[in-house]
Image: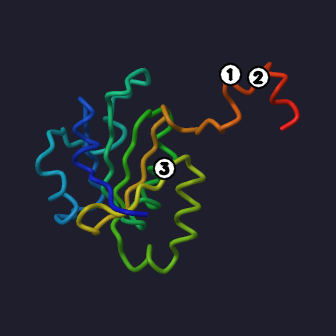
């Protein structure tokens, strides 16, 4: 997969908050041109389950992510972007960690522009892709039944 322009994605949201589980200056540099509010924990994060304009950006590494149980605590949030530090632990166990994020409903968007983080996004609006056959053209069309 290619690179994801984090800044472009964030600019499409009007209410962005950032939770830093690790202080990573390289990852933060990619957010420099974005306007966001920094929060200390998920406990202080006010959820708006009806807004597609909210985005929670979590800057983390694998150790901090599992220690904080943040994947289990983010229940009820619509839009989350995980910026996971691209460290040796991730590189050595890529399949294991990819499967973990997929299991929580995240989609993989590739590396960040600086290649310092792997980008995963949970967006309830596109959580499940509709299969090609699930559309009104394929229903009640007898001429397609034999296909």
In the visual, does 62 lie left or right of 141? left
The residue that appears at 36% across and 41% down in the rendered structure is: 42
Q: CA distance from mark 3 to mark 1?
A: 36 Å
Q: Secondary structure at mark 2?
A: loop
Please tell me whether residue 66 is drawn above or below residue 51 in the rendered image: below
In this rendering, is residue 79 above or below 142? below
Q: CA distance from mark 3 to mark 2?
A: 39 Å
Residue visible at 50% across and 36% down? Answer: 126
Q: x%, y% of residue 128?
A: 59, 38
Q: Which residue is mark 2?
A: 139
**143 to the left or right of 39:** right
Secondary structure of the residue carrying numbered label 1? helix
Q: Name the image quarter holding the C terminus.
A: top right
Q: Earlier in the sequence, mark 3 or mark 1?
A: 3
Which quarter of the image is occupied by the N terminus? bottom left
Question: 10 Å neighbourhood of mark 1: few (<14), some, or many (≥20)?
Answer: few
Query: Badge 2: how crowded within 10 Å, few (<14), some, or many (20+)?
Result: few
Residue at the location (24% across, 42% down)?
39
Q: Please report contact status of discs 2 and 1: CB closer than 8 Å, yes or no.
A: yes
Q: Which one is in front, 135 or 24?
A: 135
Please provide percent x and percent y for residue 127.
54, 38
Q: Which residue is mark 3?
A: 71
Asked if residue 40 lies left or right of residue 96, the reply is left
Residue at image mark 1: 136
């Amino acid at each position: 997969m290619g690179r994801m322009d984090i800044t472009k994605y964030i600019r499409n949201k009007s209410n962005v908050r950032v939770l830093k589980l690790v202080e990573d200056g390289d990852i933060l540099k990619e957010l420099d041109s974005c306007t966001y509010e920094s929060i200390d924990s998920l406990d202080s994060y006010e959820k708006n389950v009806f807004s597609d304009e909210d985005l929670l950006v979590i800057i983390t590494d694998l150790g901090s992510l599992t220690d904080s149980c943040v994947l289990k605590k983010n229940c009820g949030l619509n839009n989350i972007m995980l910026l996971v530090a691209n460290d040796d632990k991730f590189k050595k166990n890529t399949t294991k960690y990819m499967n973990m994020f997929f299991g929580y409903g995240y989609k993989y968007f590739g590396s960040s522009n600086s290649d310092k983080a792997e980008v995963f996004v949970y967006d309830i609006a596109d959580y499940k892709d509709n299969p090609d056959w699930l559309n009104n053209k394929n229903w009640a069309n007898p001429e397609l039944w034999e296909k």
